[in-house]
Image (cartoon, rainbow, N blue to C red):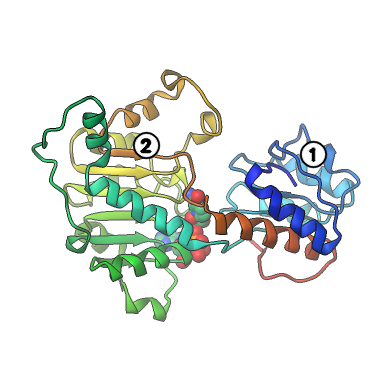
Protein backbone atom coordinates (compact mmCIF):
# COMPACT_ATOMS: atom_id res chain seq x y z
CA UNK A 1 0.00 0.00 0.00
CA UNK A 2 1.70 3.17 -1.26
CA UNK A 3 1.25 6.78 -0.09
CA UNK A 4 -0.16 5.80 3.29
CA UNK A 5 -1.24 8.60 5.64
CA UNK A 6 -1.08 8.28 9.45
CA UNK A 7 -4.89 8.55 9.68
CA UNK A 8 -5.27 5.41 7.59
CA UNK A 9 -3.24 3.15 9.90
CA UNK A 10 -6.01 2.02 12.30
CA UNK A 11 -8.24 0.98 9.38
CA UNK A 12 -5.38 -0.83 7.62
CA UNK A 13 -4.49 -2.68 10.81
CA UNK A 14 -8.12 -3.61 11.40
CA UNK A 15 -8.42 -4.95 7.83
CA UNK A 16 -5.26 -7.03 8.28
CA UNK A 17 -6.46 -8.40 11.63
CA UNK A 18 -9.93 -9.29 10.36
CA UNK A 19 -8.90 -10.80 7.00
CA UNK A 20 -5.51 -12.25 7.86
CA UNK A 21 -3.98 -10.42 4.86
CA UNK A 22 -0.53 -8.91 5.22
CA UNK A 23 -0.45 -5.22 4.33
CA UNK A 24 2.89 -3.41 4.01
CA UNK A 25 2.62 0.36 4.36
CA UNK A 26 4.83 2.72 2.36
CA UNK A 27 4.71 6.51 2.57
CA UNK A 28 5.90 7.37 -0.98
CA UNK A 29 3.74 7.59 -4.09
CA UNK A 30 3.98 4.66 -6.50
CA UNK A 31 6.61 5.48 -9.13
CA UNK A 32 9.20 3.84 -11.32
CA UNK A 33 11.74 4.40 -8.53
CA UNK A 34 9.92 2.32 -5.93
CA UNK A 35 7.75 -0.11 -7.93
CA UNK A 36 10.26 -2.89 -7.14
CA UNK A 37 9.09 -2.78 -3.52
CA UNK A 38 5.87 -4.46 -4.75
CA UNK A 39 7.81 -7.56 -5.83
CA UNK A 40 6.65 -10.62 -3.91
CA UNK A 41 3.23 -9.13 -3.11
CA UNK A 42 -0.10 -10.09 -4.69
CA UNK A 43 -1.68 -6.65 -5.01
CA UNK A 44 -0.93 -2.90 -4.98
CA UNK A 45 -2.98 0.04 -3.73
CA UNK A 46 -2.10 3.72 -3.96
CA UNK A 47 -3.59 7.17 -3.66
CA UNK A 48 -1.92 10.04 -5.52
CA UNK A 49 -2.17 12.97 -7.91
CA UNK A 50 1.14 12.14 -9.61
CA UNK A 51 0.85 10.24 -12.91
CA UNK A 52 1.92 6.62 -12.87
CA UNK A 53 4.30 6.02 -15.82
CA UNK A 54 3.29 3.20 -18.20
CA UNK A 55 6.54 1.37 -17.41
CA UNK A 56 5.24 0.82 -13.86
CA UNK A 57 2.40 -1.37 -15.17
CA UNK A 58 4.84 -3.57 -17.08
CA UNK A 59 6.98 -4.01 -13.94
CA UNK A 60 3.94 -4.92 -11.83
CA UNK A 61 2.96 -7.53 -14.45
CA UNK A 62 6.53 -8.95 -14.36
CA UNK A 63 6.11 -9.41 -10.59
CA UNK A 64 2.93 -11.44 -11.21
CA UNK A 65 0.65 -8.68 -9.91
CA UNK A 66 -2.70 -8.61 -11.69
CA UNK A 67 -4.19 -5.26 -10.71
CA UNK A 68 -3.68 -1.67 -9.64
CA UNK A 69 -6.16 -0.12 -7.21
CA UNK A 70 -6.52 3.58 -6.41
CA UNK A 71 -8.18 4.47 -3.14
CA UNK A 72 -9.60 7.69 -4.62
CA UNK A 73 -12.39 8.71 -7.01
CA UNK A 74 -10.53 10.50 -9.85
CA UNK A 75 -8.47 8.10 -11.97
CA UNK A 76 -7.16 10.56 -14.58
CA UNK A 77 -3.59 9.69 -13.48
CA UNK A 78 -4.01 6.15 -14.83
CA UNK A 79 -3.50 5.13 -18.46
CA UNK A 80 -6.23 2.51 -18.62
CA UNK A 81 -5.26 1.35 -22.12
CA UNK A 82 -1.66 0.77 -21.02
CA UNK A 83 -2.87 -1.05 -17.88
CA UNK A 84 -4.97 -3.43 -19.95
CA UNK A 85 -2.15 -3.86 -22.47
CA UNK A 86 0.13 -4.94 -19.60
CA UNK A 87 -2.51 -7.52 -18.64
CA UNK A 88 -3.58 -5.77 -15.42
CA UNK A 89 -7.01 -4.70 -14.16
CA UNK A 90 -7.68 -1.34 -12.49
CA UNK A 91 -10.08 -0.04 -9.88
CA UNK A 92 -10.83 3.13 -7.95
CA UNK A 93 -13.11 3.81 -4.97
CA UNK A 94 -15.94 5.50 -6.82
CA UNK A 95 -17.90 6.51 -3.72
CA UNK A 96 -16.07 6.63 -0.40
CA UNK A 97 -18.09 9.66 0.71
CA UNK A 98 -19.47 12.05 -1.93
CA UNK A 99 -20.78 14.17 0.96
CA UNK A 100 -17.22 14.85 2.16
CA UNK A 101 -16.46 16.81 -1.02
CA UNK A 102 -19.95 18.27 -1.36
CA UNK A 103 -19.94 19.59 2.23
CA UNK A 104 -16.54 21.22 1.80
CA UNK A 105 -17.66 22.85 -1.46
CA UNK A 106 -20.67 24.28 0.38
CA UNK A 107 -18.45 25.43 3.27
CA UNK A 108 -16.14 27.32 0.93
CA UNK A 109 -19.05 28.84 -0.99
CA UNK A 110 -20.39 30.18 2.30
CA UNK A 111 -16.94 31.52 3.21
CA UNK A 112 -16.72 33.25 -0.18
CA UNK A 113 -20.09 34.97 -0.11
CA UNK A 114 -19.45 36.12 3.49
CA UNK A 115 -16.02 37.60 2.50
CA UNK A 116 -14.49 35.64 5.37
CA UNK A 117 -10.91 35.74 4.09
CA UNK A 118 -10.99 39.52 3.97
CA UNK A 119 -12.57 39.90 7.43
CA UNK A 120 -10.11 37.41 8.90
CA UNK A 121 -7.20 39.36 7.42
CA UNK A 122 -8.48 42.79 8.50
CA UNK A 123 -9.46 41.79 12.04
CA UNK A 124 -6.14 39.99 12.53
CA UNK A 125 -4.45 43.29 11.58
CA UNK A 126 -6.60 45.20 14.11
CA UNK A 127 -9.13 46.65 11.64
CA UNK A 128 -12.65 45.98 12.96
CA UNK A 129 -14.53 48.27 10.55
CA UNK A 130 -17.21 47.21 8.06
CA UNK A 131 -16.10 47.25 4.45
CA UNK A 132 -17.98 48.84 1.56
CA UNK A 133 -18.85 45.94 -0.72
CA UNK A 134 -18.42 43.60 2.24
CA UNK A 135 -22.09 42.74 2.57
CA UNK A 136 -22.93 39.11 1.94
CA UNK A 137 -25.15 37.32 -0.53
CA UNK A 138 -27.49 34.81 1.10
CA UNK A 139 -27.50 31.24 -0.18
CA UNK A 140 -31.23 31.22 -0.99
CA UNK A 141 -30.77 34.22 -3.33
CA UNK A 142 -28.35 32.30 -5.54
CA UNK A 143 -28.64 30.29 -8.72
CA UNK A 144 -25.93 27.64 -8.71
CA UNK A 145 -24.80 25.73 -11.81
CA UNK A 146 -23.40 22.30 -11.03
CA UNK A 147 -21.23 21.11 -13.93
CA UNK A 148 -21.31 17.34 -13.57
CA UNK A 149 -24.26 16.15 -11.47
CA UNK A 150 -22.82 12.76 -10.55
CA UNK A 151 -22.33 11.51 -7.00
CA UNK A 152 -20.66 14.66 -5.64
CA UNK A 153 -22.46 17.23 -7.81
CA UNK A 154 -25.89 15.82 -6.95
CA UNK A 155 -25.04 15.64 -3.21
CA UNK A 156 -24.10 19.34 -3.37
CA UNK A 157 -27.22 20.16 -5.40
CA UNK A 158 -29.45 18.45 -2.85
CA UNK A 159 -27.97 20.46 0.05
CA UNK A 160 -28.13 23.76 -1.87
CA UNK A 161 -31.75 23.08 -2.80
CA UNK A 162 -32.56 22.36 0.86
CA UNK A 163 -31.06 25.77 1.72
CA UNK A 164 -33.30 27.49 -0.82
CA UNK A 165 -30.90 28.01 -3.72
CA UNK A 166 -31.95 27.37 -7.31
CA UNK A 167 -29.78 24.63 -8.79
CA UNK A 168 -29.08 24.11 -12.50
CA UNK A 169 -27.24 21.02 -13.69
CA UNK A 170 -25.16 20.38 -16.80
CA UNK A 171 -24.50 16.70 -17.43
CA UNK A 172 -24.73 14.50 -20.53
CA UNK A 173 -26.07 11.71 -18.30
CA UNK A 174 -29.62 12.20 -17.01
CA UNK A 175 -30.83 10.94 -13.62
CA UNK A 176 -34.58 11.36 -13.13
CA UNK A 177 -34.27 11.27 -9.32
CA UNK A 178 -32.18 14.47 -9.42
CA UNK A 179 -35.18 16.40 -10.76
CA UNK A 180 -36.37 16.68 -7.13
CA UNK A 181 -33.69 19.26 -6.43
CA UNK A 182 -32.21 20.54 -9.72
CA UNK A 183 -33.09 21.51 -13.30
CA UNK A 184 -31.10 20.10 -16.20
CA UNK A 185 -30.06 22.82 -18.68
CA UNK A 186 -27.50 23.33 -21.46
CA UNK A 187 -24.02 24.62 -20.58
CA UNK A 188 -24.71 27.97 -22.28
CA UNK A 189 -27.97 28.41 -20.36
CA UNK A 190 -26.25 27.54 -17.07
CA UNK A 191 -23.42 30.01 -17.65
CA UNK A 192 -25.88 32.76 -18.56
CA UNK A 193 -28.06 32.24 -15.46
CA UNK A 194 -25.68 31.18 -12.70
CA UNK A 195 -24.35 33.27 -9.82
CA UNK A 196 -22.14 30.34 -8.85
CA UNK A 197 -20.53 27.72 -11.12
CA UNK A 198 -19.25 24.56 -9.44
CA UNK A 199 -17.20 21.88 -11.23
CA UNK A 200 -17.76 18.19 -10.43
CA UNK A 201 -16.80 16.38 -13.65
CA UNK A 202 -13.99 13.92 -14.13
CA UNK A 203 -10.86 15.19 -15.90
CA UNK A 204 -10.78 13.79 -19.44
CA UNK A 205 -10.24 14.96 -23.03
CA UNK A 206 -13.70 16.61 -23.11
CA UNK A 207 -13.39 18.48 -19.81
CA UNK A 208 -9.69 19.51 -19.75
CA UNK A 209 -9.47 23.31 -20.07
CA UNK A 210 -13.28 23.58 -20.13
CA UNK A 211 -13.17 26.93 -18.28
CA UNK A 212 -11.18 28.93 -20.85
CA UNK A 213 -11.54 32.44 -22.30
CA UNK A 214 -14.62 31.46 -24.35
CA UNK A 215 -16.26 29.96 -21.25
CA UNK A 216 -15.67 33.06 -19.11
CA UNK A 217 -17.13 35.30 -21.87
CA UNK A 218 -20.46 33.49 -21.40
CA UNK A 219 -20.77 33.85 -17.62
CA UNK A 220 -22.67 36.50 -15.70
CA UNK A 221 -20.76 39.44 -14.29
CA UNK A 222 -19.90 38.87 -10.60
CA UNK A 223 -20.25 35.11 -10.72
CA UNK A 224 -18.33 32.82 -8.34
CA UNK A 225 -16.30 29.82 -9.54
CA UNK A 226 -15.79 26.68 -7.44
CA UNK A 227 -13.40 23.87 -8.36
CA UNK A 228 -13.30 20.85 -6.07
CA UNK A 229 -12.81 18.32 -8.88
CA UNK A 230 -9.55 18.53 -10.86
CA UNK A 231 -7.23 21.53 -11.45
CA UNK A 232 -6.86 21.29 -15.25
CA UNK A 233 -10.62 21.79 -15.76
CA UNK A 234 -9.91 25.53 -15.39
CA UNK A 235 -7.23 27.47 -17.27
CA UNK A 236 -5.62 29.50 -14.48
CA UNK A 237 -4.63 32.41 -16.75
CA UNK A 238 -8.22 32.80 -18.01
CA UNK A 239 -9.46 32.65 -14.40
CA UNK A 240 -6.91 35.26 -13.28
CA UNK A 241 -7.88 37.61 -16.12
CA UNK A 242 -11.51 37.48 -15.01
CA UNK A 243 -10.62 37.95 -11.35
CA UNK A 244 -8.35 40.93 -12.13
CA UNK A 245 -11.08 42.61 -14.19
CA UNK A 246 -13.69 41.94 -11.46
CA UNK A 247 -15.87 40.03 -13.89
CA UNK A 248 -15.71 37.26 -11.30
CA UNK A 249 -16.76 37.97 -7.72
CA UNK A 250 -14.44 35.26 -6.43
CA UNK A 251 -13.27 31.68 -6.58
CA UNK A 252 -12.70 28.75 -4.25
CA UNK A 253 -10.20 26.18 -5.48
CA UNK A 254 -9.22 22.93 -3.77
CA UNK A 255 -7.29 21.80 -6.84
CA UNK A 256 -4.97 23.56 -9.30
CA UNK A 257 -3.42 22.47 -12.63
CA UNK A 258 0.13 22.78 -11.25
CA UNK A 259 -0.63 21.52 -7.73
CA UNK A 260 1.98 18.75 -7.89
CA UNK A 261 4.68 21.45 -8.02
CA UNK A 262 3.93 22.64 -4.48
CA UNK A 263 1.19 20.72 -2.67
CA UNK A 264 1.96 18.09 -0.04
CA UNK A 265 4.99 19.90 1.32
CA UNK A 266 5.87 22.90 3.46
CA UNK A 267 7.58 25.71 1.58
CA UNK A 268 8.19 29.44 1.57
CA UNK A 269 5.05 31.05 0.04
CA UNK A 270 7.31 33.13 -2.22
CA UNK A 271 8.56 29.98 -3.95
CA UNK A 272 5.20 28.66 -5.18
CA UNK A 273 4.40 29.29 -8.88
CA UNK A 274 3.66 32.96 -9.73
CA UNK A 275 0.05 32.31 -10.78
CA UNK A 276 -0.66 30.63 -7.43
CA UNK A 277 0.97 33.50 -5.54
CA UNK A 278 -1.34 35.91 -7.34
CA UNK A 279 -4.37 33.82 -6.34
CA UNK A 280 -3.08 33.61 -2.75
CA UNK A 281 -2.91 37.41 -2.54
CA UNK A 282 -6.57 37.91 -3.52
CA UNK A 283 -9.08 38.34 -0.70
CA UNK A 284 -11.82 36.86 -2.87
CA UNK A 285 -9.94 33.65 -3.68
CA UNK A 286 -9.95 30.72 -1.26
CA UNK A 287 -7.31 28.04 -1.75
CA UNK A 288 -7.02 24.69 0.01
CA UNK A 289 -4.59 21.78 -0.38
CA UNK A 290 -6.81 19.17 -2.13
CA UNK A 291 -8.52 18.29 1.14
CA UNK A 292 -12.18 18.22 0.11
CA UNK A 293 -12.19 14.43 0.46
CA UNK A 294 -10.39 14.43 3.80
CA UNK A 295 -13.02 13.38 6.36
CA UNK A 296 -13.00 10.53 8.88
CA UNK A 297 -15.69 8.59 7.02
CA UNK A 298 -13.92 9.03 3.68
CA UNK A 299 -10.58 7.76 5.03
CA UNK A 300 -12.21 4.70 6.61
CA UNK A 301 -14.08 3.82 3.40
CA UNK A 302 -11.11 4.52 1.10
CA UNK A 303 -8.95 2.07 3.04
CA UNK A 304 -11.54 -0.66 3.58
CA UNK A 305 -13.02 -0.62 0.07
CA UNK A 306 -9.68 -0.40 -1.76
CA UNK A 307 -8.05 -3.23 0.21
CA UNK A 308 -11.10 -5.48 -0.23
CA UNK A 309 -11.22 -4.72 -3.97
CA UNK A 310 -7.45 -5.20 -4.43
CA UNK A 311 -7.66 -8.67 -2.88
CA UNK A 312 -10.73 -9.52 -5.00
CA UNK A 313 -9.03 -8.39 -8.23
CA UNK A 314 -5.87 -10.32 -7.33
CA UNK A 315 -8.04 -13.41 -6.91
CA UNK A 316 -9.69 -12.84 -10.33
CA UNK A 317 -13.09 -11.85 -8.94
CA UNK A 318 -15.48 -9.27 -10.38
CA UNK A 319 -15.93 -6.00 -8.45
CA UNK A 320 -18.21 -3.01 -8.85
CA UNK A 321 -15.32 -0.50 -8.85
CA UNK A 322 -13.37 -2.01 -11.76
CA UNK A 323 -12.45 0.62 -14.40
CA UNK A 324 -12.99 -0.58 -17.96
CA UNK A 325 -12.07 2.56 -19.97
P1 LIG B 1 -19.25 10.82 -10.86
O1 LIG B 1 -18.68 9.94 -11.93
O2 LIG B 1 -20.27 10.25 -9.93
O3 LIG B 1 -19.85 12.16 -11.52
C1 LIG B 1 -19.25 12.86 -12.55
C2 LIG B 1 -20.36 13.39 -13.43
O4 LIG B 1 -19.78 14.25 -14.43
C3 LIG B 1 -21.12 12.29 -14.19
O5 LIG B 1 -22.50 12.39 -13.92
C4 LIG B 1 -20.78 12.56 -15.65
O6 LIG B 1 -21.84 12.20 -16.53
C5 LIG B 1 -20.53 14.06 -15.62
N1 LIG B 1 -19.78 14.55 -16.77
C6 LIG B 1 -18.82 13.92 -17.51
N2 LIG B 1 -18.39 14.71 -18.51
C7 LIG B 1 -19.10 15.88 -18.41
C8 LIG B 1 -19.12 17.09 -19.15
N3 LIG B 1 -18.31 17.26 -20.20
N4 LIG B 1 -19.98 18.07 -18.76
C9 LIG B 1 -20.79 17.89 -17.70
N5 LIG B 1 -20.83 16.75 -16.97
C10 LIG B 1 -19.99 15.78 -17.31
O7 LIG B 1 -17.98 11.36 -10.04
P2 LIG B 1 -18.00 12.08 -8.61
O8 LIG B 1 -17.83 11.05 -7.55
O9 LIG B 1 -19.15 13.01 -8.53
O10 LIG B 1 -16.60 12.86 -8.70
C11 LIG B 1 -16.40 13.93 -9.64
C12 LIG B 1 -14.93 14.33 -9.67
O11 LIG B 1 -14.55 14.94 -8.44
C13 LIG B 1 -13.97 13.13 -9.77
O12 LIG B 1 -13.77 12.71 -11.11
C14 LIG B 1 -12.71 13.64 -9.14
O13 LIG B 1 -11.82 14.12 -10.14
C15 LIG B 1 -13.16 14.80 -8.26
N6 LIG B 1 -12.88 14.55 -6.83
C16 LIG B 1 -12.18 15.50 -6.11
C17 LIG B 1 -11.91 15.28 -4.77
C18 LIG B 1 -11.17 16.29 -3.90
O14 LIG B 1 -10.73 15.93 -2.80
N7 LIG B 1 -11.02 17.53 -4.30
C19 LIG B 1 -12.36 14.09 -4.15
C20 LIG B 1 -13.10 13.17 -4.91
C21 LIG B 1 -13.36 13.42 -6.23
Classify 123 as above or below 296. above
Among the two numbered marks 1 and 2 on one chain, the one whose residue lies closer to the N terminus: 1
Quadrant of res 156? bottom left
Q: Residue at x 30, y 48 (%)?
A: 225
Secondary element type, mark 1: helix
Query: Label 1: which residue?
Result: 35
Q: Nearer the viewer, residue 11 or 218?
A: 11
- Horizontally, is 43 left or right of 221 in the view? right
Answer above or below: position of 252 versus 141.
above
Asked which quadrant contains residue 300, the reply is: bottom right
Cα distance, mark 1 to mark 2? 33 Å
Q: Residue at x 81, y 53 (%)?
A: 43
Q: Is residue 230 left or right of residue 138?
A: right
Q: Residue at x 14, y 41 (%)?
A: 134
Neighbor class of circle 1 (other Cα within 10 Å; few <14, some 14-19, many 20+) is: some
Q: Is residue 81 left or right of residue 111?
A: right
Task: Determine whether label 1 and label 2 are within 8 Å by CB.
Answer: no
- Indicate whether 94 appears above or below 250: below
Q: Where is mark 2, residue-wise? A: 236
Which residue is at the front of the view, 172 or 300?
Answer: 300
Amino acid sequence: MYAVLGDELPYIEKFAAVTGQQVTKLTDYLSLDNVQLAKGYDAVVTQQTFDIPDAVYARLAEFGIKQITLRQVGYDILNIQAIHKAGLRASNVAAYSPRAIAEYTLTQLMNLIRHNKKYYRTTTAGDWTWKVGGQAKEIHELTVAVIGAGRIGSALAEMLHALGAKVLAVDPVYHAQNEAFLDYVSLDEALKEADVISFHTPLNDQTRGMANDAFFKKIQKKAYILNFARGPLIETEALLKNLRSDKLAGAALDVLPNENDFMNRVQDPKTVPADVQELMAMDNVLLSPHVAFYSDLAIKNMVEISLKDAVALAQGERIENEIFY
